Image (cartoon, rainbow, N blue to C red):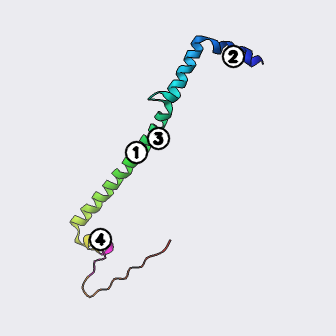
Amino acid sequence: MQFRKKIVPHIKNKYVLTLLVFFVWILFFDQNNLVTRFTSQRQISQLESDIQYFRDRIRQDSIRMNQLKTDNENLEKFAREQYLMKRENEDIFVIEFEN
């Protein structure tokens, strides 16, 4: 009861009520509400981590491509592993493991 007697008069104040309505509006109904901002921030973080992953992947692939362009042994190894190419009079057996 004591709590109610202290709070109710303040809530009836038109300035406090206006401020309360404003905060509720900003939290939920505005075009740039806080819920949307938090969701957008999470999405931005995910996209930044994706950018970092793809930059690392580009760096690794460019190193690999440079190795393939400069060394014929690496090129042959890559072709044999990835495209199952073989030399003449050679048999290839593909073994697949189940997880």
Name the residue furthest right.
1
Disc 1/disc 2 C-alpha distance (Å):
45 Å
Please tell me the numbered disc located at residue 7.
2
List x then y, in percent, for residue 5.
74, 14
Residue marked by disc 4? 78
| Label 4 vs 1, first from the N-terminus | 1
| Label 2 vs 3, first from the N-terminus | 2
| Label 4 vs 3, first from the N-terminus | 3
Q: Is residue 44 above or below residue 86?
A: above
Q: Is residue 26 above or below residue 84?
A: above
List x then y, in percent, for residue 43.
44, 42
List x then y, in percent, for residue 52.
38, 48
Residue marked by disc 1? 47
| Residue at figure coordinates x 34%, y 83% from the top left | 92
Q: Which residues are magenta?
A: 80-86
Please tell me the numbered disc located at residue 64.
none
| Residue at figure coordinates x 32%, y 85% from the top left | 91
Instruction: Report which quarter residue 40 is drawn in.
Output: top left
**Residues marked 4 and 1 touching at CB (< 8 Å):** no
Instruction: Report which quarter residue 57 is drawn in.
Output: bottom left
Residue 50 falls left or right of residue 85: right
Q: Is residue 13 magenta?
A: no
**Residues marked 1 and 2 touching at CB (< 8 Å):** no
Nearer mark to the viewer, of 4 and 2: 2
Give the structural element (helix, strand or loop) at label 2: helix
Disc 4/disc 2 C-alpha distance (Å):
75 Å
Q: Is residue 85 magenta?
A: yes
Residue marked by disc 3? 42
